[in-house]
Amino acid sequence: MAKKKARTPEESSWDRASVALLERACAIEMETAFERADSITPCPIGADGLCCKNCSMGPCRLVGKTDRGVCGATIATVAARNFARAVTVGAASHSDHGRDMAYTLLEAAEGHAPDYGVRDPYKLMEVADFLDVPTKDEEGERRPINDIARDVALAALGEFGKVRGEFYYRKRAPAKRQEIWESLGITPRNIDREIVDLLHRTHIGNDQDAEHILDQTLRCALGDGWGGSMLGTDISDILFGTPAPVRSQANLGVLSEDKVNIIIHGHEPTLSEMIVAAAMDPEMIEYAKSKGAKGIQMSGICCTANETVMRQGVPLAGNFLQQELAILTGAVEAMVVDVQCIMQGIVPLADKFHTEVITTSRKVKITGATHIEFDESKALEIAKQIVRRAIDLFPKRGETHIPEDHNPLVPGFSHEYIDYALGGLYRGSLRPLNDAIMAGRIRGVVANIGCNNARVRHDELFHHVVTEFLKNDILVVETGCGAIASAKQGFMTPEAALEVAGPGLREVCETVGMPPVLHMGSCVDNSRILTVLAQMATEGGLGEDICDIPAVGMAPEWMSEKALSIATYCVASGAYVILGGSDGPVSGSEEVLRLMTEGWEEKVGGRLEFVEEAEEIVRRSIEHIDKKRAALGLPEYDASKWGRSGDRRMPDLLEIPFEERIEAVYGLAGK
Ligand code: NFS
């Protein structure tokens, strides 16, 4: 591959463990995505959304004097159509994951998947209610759990292809939001239909009005956020338990020198939960010992990591751009993958080591990888087969280079747990959060989510924006690879609040005992963030709708089509969303950019902006939060008012002179 300007390891990643392994890659001349990103110049026409290849009269590149394709399609039509296609793929990926979870619940309820069952009956009852599934029989007696589970699974599957009637999960949004969707005609009819409808429209000779294409894009994305993703989250909780805080560790330093390392990578907890169970089986541990290992070390990459860290505390090996780097340690026996965000590059790299890449999904094979197809009816048996295979590779392990870096984290902040943490078992509510925002102790909320992107310095944008938000008393909630970045950086422990957060946010975190950056799960779990926002809007004091709340959503290092779908459903739900790292995939069309900002703000109260620089992302976010505070008539943010509530920890106070201590605790000095 011809080399252009190559970045040094430090220029490629902000993360120390990754830099060490990139140095290793250089030393042993192994190629990674970082190097390929340097070698491949992205096509500037495609990057701006100006290349149409929807028929064989093209591809038409709308640059220079060319402002229409062969069929006459305009720049705005082409840019909107390309964006719409990306959103449909993203929505399809999340939603199909949700569908698979529903099938697993159905199989479990009907007794065909004996290794699975209902682990959270409370969540099952709640979801049954949303889906109009009766939980009691005609005599008023509780129906058997598996009957309810079967009907919930069937009703959930109905949301994908419902023939007529309403999309049930619309009820999860604030009433005002539902009215907006209704008046614009963008309430999803069913999840699959909006995806297919949008794909149909983007065929040559169909919808050729950018605004009209983008309206359906909002509708399709809503079917993801409030449909496929939300069902994916809910059913995962029913099957595997609703997350609550646990302790864990993050970064490649979690790999073990003397245990069999198995990395689970992908997205679906169906497989990973079983592998985790298999790896804990005493028989498997004994088998590992018989091969000279001290045991089995599980860890995760990407959203599988987020699913299993939230529920089981399985350590996070790393985020998207660390999948190849994990193999470069030489210490990984098996990387077991299912669906989404799996780079083909891991297979040739694994070939150079003793590592085996094992694909498991019916939907995903990678040339050169071992395929062991997962089957829910024999889940644990297959999981054990995979674990055994990994153990067999341990004696072949050669030289290892495991970085030392890892940081503690406390993940597990489902919306249910946040309710509980703030209000206790009997008064569970978001009232204290709303009150803290209204008083100005918490200036606002940022949802910081999404991918890594090999074209921007790995993890740097995440680090920059999160640090600035915390200093400004902004609570940060996270999912996906963004959450893994913060975990690695040590932002996800309660102690972190003392180090980084501003005085108001610190007081709140100390009182509740929570980190200032909350890990809320995988990318489908952005639906948890929607739920929190909906509850904040209905709790009172912060308006009546999501668009009234002083909050911003962002994916500073995004790269996937799923991230575009998330951004779009958040906007359609009323949020201001910023995608970072570049000027975005529609930058070639002024009209589409205007439609996604002013146009969408007028229609749905949210807007989508593409902002390359971290400083500018922070500036615009804080400006938006303050604008929303002012619109609600809340006091102007003033950091000097906080930090004296008496919540400061004793060890801190003991360090300072007595008079200052009085001032710090009671604010009484001089009065
Ligand atoms: Ni989300 Fe999760 Fe990571 Fe991006 Fe990929 S793993 S679904 S798409 S890269 S955050």
Image (tube, rainbow, N blue to C red):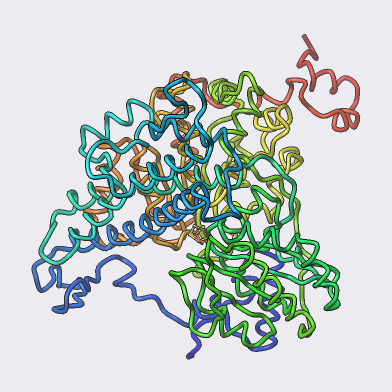
Percent of width and height locating residue 661: 85, 22
Indicate the quadrant where residue 64 lies. Answer: bottom left
Residue 472 horizontal side relative to residue 340, left or right? right
Q: Nearer the viewer, residue 171 or 520?
A: 171
Residue 258 horizontal side relative to residue 594, left or right? right
Q: Nearer the viewer, residue 585 or 304?
A: 304
> Which quadrant is home to the C terminus?
top right
For the question of whether residue 612 can be seen, the reply is yes
Residue 491 horizontal side relative to residue 171, left or right? right
Percent of width and height locating residue 656: 88, 29
Q: What residue is shown at x 76% (from left), y 24% (from top)? A: 647
Identify the residue at the far front of this view.
Answer: 139
Percent of width and height locating residue 32: 57, 79
Q: What residue is shown at x 36% (from left), y 45% (from top)? A: 569
Q: Is residue 373 above or below residue 630?
A: below
Q: What residue is shown at x 58% (from left), y 84% (from top)? A: 31
Q: Nearer the viewer, residue 291 or 69?
A: 291
Residue 165 horizontal side relative to residue 413, left or right? left
Percent of width and height locating residue 484: 62, 55
Q: What residue is shown at x 20% (from left), y 38% (from top)? A: 185
